[in-house]
């Protein structure tokens, strides 16, 4: 790094009234290219480790196969879907990352030249769609990795084009108040956009030091705002898929800073961030399905960033779920996983996957904005029980009205389920105001998003209070009783004076859900709901037999004595709603007199044969 630049940058900080101590890094100590994630020579360690590591070899073959496929594909073109260019940006990241990685592993120029073509193509776009800045963040990261990893082999005119594009299509709009709201955001936009920009800054630090350093310093002030969501324990309020998105970028930010400067500026020390890897591990059930609360899908996936967490924490048990994905013959990587696959090899080849063992604890609990209790009694697929319980608030980013909801697995079957998210574009193209989360906002008219179709309580037929918050009151960690007790009172807008929900696995034999409610100054009608894709058969008014995949479970009302189960289909009422084939709701209602208390107790009992 040019020392003249460092002196100039220091003077600029002082002239701006900024103390030198506020500077996060010594820019004179930046490493040479390649400096992002995998430095020169580290390819040798990866190649050597592949010989005795079939899981890693499989990932490597996947990346090489994709790189070979890309050799004959046309380069990307500018094509928006609705207001997003994001699909193109993500594809660019996958292509350039894969091609550059395979070039570094093999030294074959065909991969370098093909990656360079892709970089020239996307850098020739008129813009990277700053009105939806995630698109800019991912595209900037894409060309930055190519620029850094292929630096010695790129044509001078390509280098100039990439540098100009990073400055004009990345940095410039990030300084525009019309687009840079993400700098003050507390969600994944902050993580993704800042990370992409920092990759761009690290890539061109020699040539554009002043501007690049300013981007890095700004990110070091901005990113901690988004990392507050992990406090105190690591559970991520946006749920399963968005952990994979926001946290993966956050981890890649830290990894790049460490590889370039030997320091992350203290980001790893943020409360809850490193423990969030364990949270995510417990978000996958024994069936291979996710606890898909909020805007999440039920399908689980591999998270390449988990290999970075395991390496950083020196904890191979974090890779148990990843090992299952990599050893399973039918595993297909999703598009999101595919664009980060090189991370698995960069960090995963440090482990012998044969020696990876599962975590020991049967329950993981996290508090914060969206508290969860996650019970998993077995780590082999289809073995043991899984219970996911959540509190929280509908006012959280990407939230549903699902506070108090739970999922339950036994006998290798998910019995109580969450329908999950509806894809955004399917709603946006119908002009649904999906992001209006006010109490009367249209978001809560979407069938899958309100409390009527979640495994929770509904009082007097009303939607949950958006600003209601449900904390965990108590966690049960002994084998006789595993689960949590939640305070749900604020969800019901004064219709109930008090409401608590206890969801516990009893002696690892059955799940018990106990709701204790007290009506306020007027009578209250309380509905208990559970969504399932099992086939129901009513045995009597208090007992429902569920059948799925040749297994059975009995759903039993222990109280109130007058309650009777009913089955309701999940056919939505709006044309814009997604269909929900094969699922139903099992419900019962309890009428509570003014001021009186009532207990709703239900058992979910697997039928052992």
Image: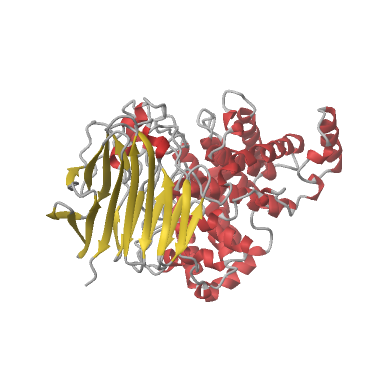
**Measured from the top left, where is residue 339 in percent x and y?**
49, 51
Front-most of residues 27 and 303: 303
In the picture shown, does residue 77 fall above or below 307? above
| Corner quadrant of residue 44 | bottom right
Give the color scheme: rainbow, by chain, secondary structure or one colour. Answer: secondary structure
**Residue found at x 50% / y 31%:** 132
**Residue found at x 74% / y 54%:** 262
**Measured from the top left, where is residue 35 in percent x and y?**
69, 53
**Measured from the top left, where is residue 483 in percent x and y?**
42, 57
**Measured from the top left, where is residue 87 in percent x and y?**
44, 40
Q: How many marks?
A: 0
Viewer can see residue 518: yes
Front-most of residues 508 and 406: 508
Decide if residue 554 is on the left or right side of residue 266.
Answer: left
Front-most of residues 139 and 366: 366
Front-most of residues 309 and 137: 309
């Amino acid at each position: 790094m040019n020392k003249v630049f460092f002196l100039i940058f220091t003077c600029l900080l002082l002239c701006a009234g900024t103390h030198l101590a506020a500077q996060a890094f010594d820019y004179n100590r930046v490493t040479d290219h390649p400096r992002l994630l995998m430095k020169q020579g580290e390819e040798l360690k990866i190649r050597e480790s592949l010989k005795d590591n079939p899981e890693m070899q499989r990932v490597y073959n996947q990346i090489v196969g994709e790189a070979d496929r890309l050799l004959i594909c046309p380069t990307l073109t500018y094509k928006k879907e609705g207001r997003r260019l994001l699909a193109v940006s993500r594809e660019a990241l996958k292509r350039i990352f894969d091609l550059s990685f395979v070039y570094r592993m093999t030294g074959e120029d065909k991969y370098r030249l093909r990656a360079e073509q892709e970089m020239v193509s996307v850098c020739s776009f008129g813009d990277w769609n700053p009105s939806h800045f995630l698109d800019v963040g991912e595209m900037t990261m894409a060309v930055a990795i190519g620029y850094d990893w292929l630096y010695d082999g790129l044509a001078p005119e390509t280098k100039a084009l990439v540098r100009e594009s990073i400055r004009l299509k990345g940095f410039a709009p990030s300084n525009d108040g019309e687009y840079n709201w993400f700098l003050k955001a507390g969600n994944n936009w902050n993580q993704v956009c800042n990370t992409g920009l920092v990759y761009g800054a690290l890539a061109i630090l020699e040539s554009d030091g002043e501007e690049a350093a300013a981007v890095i310093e700004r990110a070091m002030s901005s990113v901690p705002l988004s990392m507050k969501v992990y406090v105190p324990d690591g559970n991520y309020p946006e749920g399963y898929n968005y952990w994979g998105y926001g946290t993966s970028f956050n981890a890649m930010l830290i990894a790049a800073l460490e590889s370039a400067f030997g320091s992350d500026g203290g980001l790893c020390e943020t409360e809850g961030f490193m423990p969030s890897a364990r949270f995510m591990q417990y978000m996958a059930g024994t069936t291979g399905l996710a606890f898909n609360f909020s805007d999440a899908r039920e399908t689980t996936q591999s998270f390449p960033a988990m290999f970075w967490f395991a390496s950083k924490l020196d904890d191979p048990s974090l890779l148990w779920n990843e090992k299952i994905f990599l050893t399973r013959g039918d595993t297909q990587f999703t598009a999101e996983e595919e664009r980060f696959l090189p991370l698995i090899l960069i960090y995963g080849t440090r482990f012998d996957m044969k020696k990876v063992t599962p975590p020991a604890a049967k329950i993981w609990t996290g508090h914060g904005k969206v508290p969860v209790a996650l019970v998993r009694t077995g780590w082999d697929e289809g073995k043991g029980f899984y219970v996911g319980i959540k509190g929280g608030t509908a006012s959280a980013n990407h939230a549903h009205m699902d506070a108090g909801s739970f999922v339950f697995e036994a006998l290798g079957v998910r019995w109580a389920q969450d329908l999950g998210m509806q894809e955004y574009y399917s709603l946006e193209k119908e002009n649904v105001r999906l992001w209006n989360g006010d109490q009367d906002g249209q978001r809560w008219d979407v069938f899958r998003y309100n409390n009527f179709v979640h495994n929770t309580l509904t009082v007097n037929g009303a939607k949950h209070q958006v600003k209601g918050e449900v904390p965990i009151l108590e966690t049960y960690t002994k084998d006789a009783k595993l689960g949590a007790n939640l305070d749900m009172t604020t969800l019901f807008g004064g219709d109930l004076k008090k409401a608590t929900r206890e969801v516990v696995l009893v002696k690892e034999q059955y799940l018990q859900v106990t709701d204790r409610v007290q009506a306020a100054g007027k009578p209250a009608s309380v509905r208990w709901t559970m969504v399932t894709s099992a086939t129901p058969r009513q045995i009597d008014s208090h007992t429902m037999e569920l059948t799925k995949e040749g297994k059975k479970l009995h759903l039993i009302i222990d109280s109130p004595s007058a309650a009777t189960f009913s089955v309701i289909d999940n056919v939505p009422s709006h044309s814009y709603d997604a269909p929900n084939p094969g699922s139903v709701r099992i419900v019962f209602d309890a009428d509570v007199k003014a001021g009186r208390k009532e207990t709703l107790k239900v058992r979910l009992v697997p039928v052992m044969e």
